[in-house]
Amino acid sequence: MNEAMDFTLNGIMNAERQAIRPMSFTEPFWEATKEKKLVLQYCPETDQYQFFPRPMSLYTGKRNVEWREVSGEGELYSHTIARRSRPPYQGHEPFAVGLVTLDAGVNVIGNLINLEEEDIKVGMRLKPYWYPLPEGHHLLMFEPNGS
């Protein structure tokens, strides 16, 4: 294996990360990550999910959003390979960043791990990978879904 292409061993996984400081309207999202669960805001009036968390519905402007658990599985829509970066990620290159369209219908940006550059394909199925952070939270990343 070419170590320069290995995003697990020579990438973003080794970067130092700070503890999360949730805002009141993001707290349910971050609390769920402690249990490695992905929850998204859901607008009951429009039957749509939204991401990133907001204090109100993106669709109606009302504060009646609900939190619902989703699988976190999805399809790679686009990606890039970072070969240069700034601290705290400097020195941890290369790493992959993907735009993932979740099965729930929202787009999420996250690191792609446990694969090599030549294996990254638009349309590939991905599943969540939960990277541990200080204070018990986890950061959502994505890895290939072998099923």
Image (cartoon, rainbow, N blue to C red):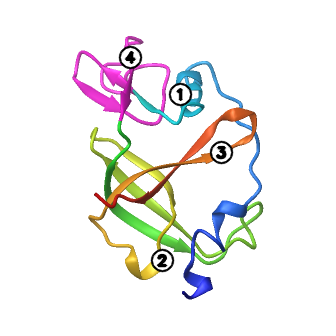
Q: Where residue 1 sits: x, y (%)?
A: 54, 87
Q: Which residue is mark 2?
A: 116
The residue at the point 33 percent across, 61 percent down is: 146
In the rendered structure, find residue 104 and report the number of the disc placed on it: none
Quadrant in which the C terminus is drawn:
bottom left
Q: Are marks 3 and 4 in contact (CB under 8 Å)?
A: no
- Secondary structure of the residue carrying numbered label 1: helix
Q: Hey, what amino acid is under mark 3?
A: Pro
Q: Earlier in the sequence, mark 3 or mark 2?
A: 2
How crowded pointer 1 is (Cα within 10 Å; few <14, some 14-19, many 20+) is rated as: some
Q: Which residues are magenta?
A: 41-70
Q: Does the magenta portion include 59?
A: yes
Q: Earlier in the sequence, mark 4 or mark 1?
A: 1
The residue at the point 39 percent across, 77 percent down is: 119
Q: Give above or below for 91 relative to 113.
A: below
Q: Quadrant of residue 14?
A: bottom right
Q: Quadrant of residue 51?
A: top left
In the rendered structure, find residue 65 and report the number of the disc placed on it: 4
How crowded pointer 2 is (Cα within 10 Å; few <14, some 14-19, many 20+) is rated as: some
Q: Where residue 110 sits: x, y (%)?
A: 50, 54
Q: Are marks 1 and 3 in contact (CB under 8 Å)?
A: no
Q: Earlier in the sequence, mark 3 or mark 4?
A: 4
* Nearer the camera: disc 4 or disc 2: 2
Q: Earlier in the sequence, mark 2 or mark 1?
A: 1
